[in-house]
Amino acid sequence: MIASRPATERTAQGMRYEASARGSTPAPFVLGVAGTAKNTGKTTTMAGIMQEGLARGWRMCLTSIGFDGEELDNVTGLPKPRIHCEEGVVVATASRCVEAGTAAFGALEDAGIDTALGRVLIGEVRRRGLVVLAGPNKTIDLEALLGRIRGMRATPDLVLVDGAFGRIAPMTAVDAIVIATGGSRNRSIPALARDTEAIVRVFGIPSLDDAGWAGLFGEVRPSLANGAGCGETLVSYKDGRVATAPGSCLLGDQAWAAGGLGIAGIRAVFAAGATDAGGIRSFVRSLQERLGGVSLVFSSPISLMVSGDPVGVATAIDWVESGGGRVWVRRPVPLLAITVNPFYPVRLSSGNFAGRFVNRKNLLREFKRRLGVPVWDVVSDRTAGLGEQVASVLQRRRPVEMKET
Amino acid sequence: MIRRALVERGHETTLLQPDLPPEEIVQAISSSGCEYVLVGRTLGYGVADVLARLADLADAAGVRSKVKMVVGGMAVRPEIAAETGFDAGFGPGTSIEEVIAYVEGRPVETSVGSVTRSKPDLTSGYTYSFKNREIEDTIRPVADEVVAWATTMTSPAVERARLRRRMAEASRSGDAGGTASLIKSYVALCDAGIAQSYDGGAVAKTRPITAEERDALARRVAQVSAQGGWKTIRHGKERPVVFIQYGTGCPIMDITHIQVGESWGADGVVHFDPSWAARKEGMLHGFLTHQEDGSLITEGNLNLIKSGMTPYTLWQVRAHRGLNTPETVVLAGEAGADLTKINMVYGSLGAGTDPERLTVDGVEAIRQAVHYGLPFDVVTNEELCGVPAHKAFAGMLIVASIARRLGGRPILQPLFCYSPQVMIEGQMKDNYVDFNAAKVMALRSIIDAPVWPGAPVGFLTHTEDRVQSSMTTALHACMASSMGVDAISIASSDEAYSGGPISAAARVDTLRAVREGFRFFGQAGVQPTPMAAEWASQLVEGIHDVLKKVRDRGSFVGALYDGLLGTREDGAYPGRSGRGTVRKANT
């Protein structure tokens, strides 16, 4: 059901974090850990990176777009990884979660963000212990939180954002991403490898810089901040005209209407919203095979991942490119690594869940053979390799400030 | 239902068809310009993924920042909402008003379903007048004899109780020297193991509760108290009030159990102490946690436990069976308890204390209860040994009459369960209703006094199956309600068969089952068969016969030794603990 308040009771929307605030100095590096499904090892990956960071003397900050660190999974009832925090780690979590852990915090700052579990509070761990994380669970709120963190007197070196389920949309706000996948996503190793290969493909879509944008859309400035509204799709023509079509999403197999715009002479289309494989196919069909030289621009790889169907999206992109079209993203989100977890839950006839595992050795071999990005099993492997990767990224960004030992 | 309420409040709503794919819901959100999206779903593993994808799509589509997304349904909790990307989650028991309040941006009424609590007096309105004149005439000389005789006697427990009261008075007046002197006199009347604890000696199976632990407890109690939101267990009736029992050994754990009970509607709590403490002369002191079942009664422990309960919770500290009976009443009264429990007959025949000793102590305990204004129940647990109900009831009525003679306010506590005696005699072969109903009917025909079946109701009909135990407790509670009794005690569903600590979850099981039972019956009731009246009549006759024998014996204590209120064949053995310790009082 959807509902609106009576006009007399409408209230103003809250302040939104402005994208221009990005890059203030010194800027912490924000790393998202997104999963392809539940139980893929997101929290274990995040905890591993945190330990690596602490070992290197980094000031760390943790938050989550879901609910992590609890003893038992909310859905399956299976044990979940706990989050042990050392003194000095900054945590952003909902007020009801502060009491749920054993870690003691110093002064807590109200981030001004409401969640189902109370206001998000930011505080530094003063006595080590377990923490439960439930931070902002939508993009606009995560951006607002990151804005506050960037404004802290002692900014963290690294902010880790834990994911939830297969949710990825709020990860638009991060600087780079680690994708956690595994048996919980698909028990078939070949199918899982295909799925992950497609994810790598989507994150590898080239980015369109300002010059490239100007070449396609002229002076038209798209609002790239997510949450700008469903707004419109930008359509530019080879004769220099730029028009708009209603809706910024390409979803489903319905024909791309383009608001009655002509398809002759189309040079580029920019869709800022969510896009799935059906939407791309529909768009291509609407062009009636006039795809040669047409650019299809998306806001980020995240907008292509929210459908949860990376194989379909990657296949559709291949279709565009094989027809002579080009695919871009306006804002890239670098895929730093893939982590894999052989574990998957199965539902027993009793209704309870139990844990099972796919063959770890075969899984890793297949992944390393097919994927061009680093792959780690953070449960069985040491996390040093993943830590090294993150360290090298941070070093490139802020070589002077690093305290690596 | 929610939509109708929203429309009535002037909101514009659109009801989407069920099972729409997330993409279509996002499109509907986008095209409608709505401010709230309310999704109702029963949760399963796959459903949570679908909800998460809906939130994700809405976010990526740019509409998430413009709408509040709410999920509601069975198994939905705020944690699920947070995890799936929603702004709020409403689970079972949510009222429509709560959802409307959320949509309208008003504070959510977390106290919905809670009640304004008050502390009832179970004895109020009762005259204690006998309706059965023959029984009154028979019982009067028995009560007279006990009071007259016991007044001339004393025991170490009587002396300690009086010292304990003086210690409390000295402490209140700030007389430290006097208190120290009284403690010295007190210790001289204690067993060696108890006495040495006053000199700092360790007590086996116990350890002190630290000041840090007490501080942490105080903080937690304050937090829980601030939450409020107590439920009521009753449904449209003032009676019966419902007691739970606690006694984990650890006062801190006890407080947690009390708070769980209070949250789920318990009106009162009963303190269980370890049975070994009842065999010792003298009582320990300080803040002590005990390794095994039963929480030690000390001044410190009682004050600690009292600090953890609401002002509206009825609190009973039992003093019915051992060598510290009158002193326990003093400690209970000083700590602010509302009720105690005294029965010389059960303590003598079913709990191991010498009849002569417990009669002297019991009379003093009643006097102390009168001083502190504590009503007390007179339990008939000796039935569990095998003593027939009519004999147990005769003893209970004698103690109640003694109490009235001394100005006390007794509460009759018939056992409301499947006792060994009825297993043998077969009164519950067909149903559990008739004989229990007969007990209440018999007592009501004899005297106008409050009735509080227990303890707990349904005991011995419970099994290790928690569902079954909750069910049978709830049914007994409903029958008690139907009989119009004043109070009941209930057990947690794992109490009889826990094999270890009682779990809070099991406690909630039973409280919820009783609440559902009360909701089911409301003002309707359980109708016994005509057999109940017949058995009630037999009980009254049997009670009278026993009372006549006790009267003719000329000595209540002698009657206890002689088996008139329960024979060895019945399973009633006059206790030996404290034998030979009664002496003439200095007049």
Image (cartoon, coloured by chain):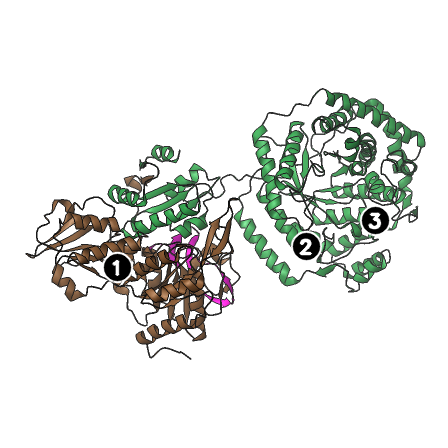
User: Magenta part of the protein: which range?
Assistant: A110-138
Q: CA distance from mark 3 to mark 1?
A: 80 Å
The residue lying at 28 percent from left, 40 percent from top is: A7
Q: Which mark is residue B250?
A: 2
Q: Name the secondary structure under disc 1.
A: loop
Disc 3 marks a residue whose amino acid type is: Leu
Q: Do the residues at discs 3 and 2 belong to one chain?
A: yes
The chain identifier of the residue carrying mark 3 reads B
Is residue A24 placed above or below B539 in the rendered structure? below
Q: Which mark is residue A142?
A: none
Asked if residue A129 lies in the magenta stretch, the reply is: yes
Q: Which chain is brown?
A: A
Q: Position of residue B142 (x, y in %)?
A: 88, 32
Q: Position of residue B341 (x, y in %)?
A: 76, 41
Q: Which chain is green?
A: B
Q: CA distance from mark 3 to mark 2?
A: 22 Å
Q: Position of residue B93 (x, y in %)?
A: 49, 39
The chain identifier of the residue carrying mark 1 reads A
Q: Name the secondary structure under disc 3.
A: loop
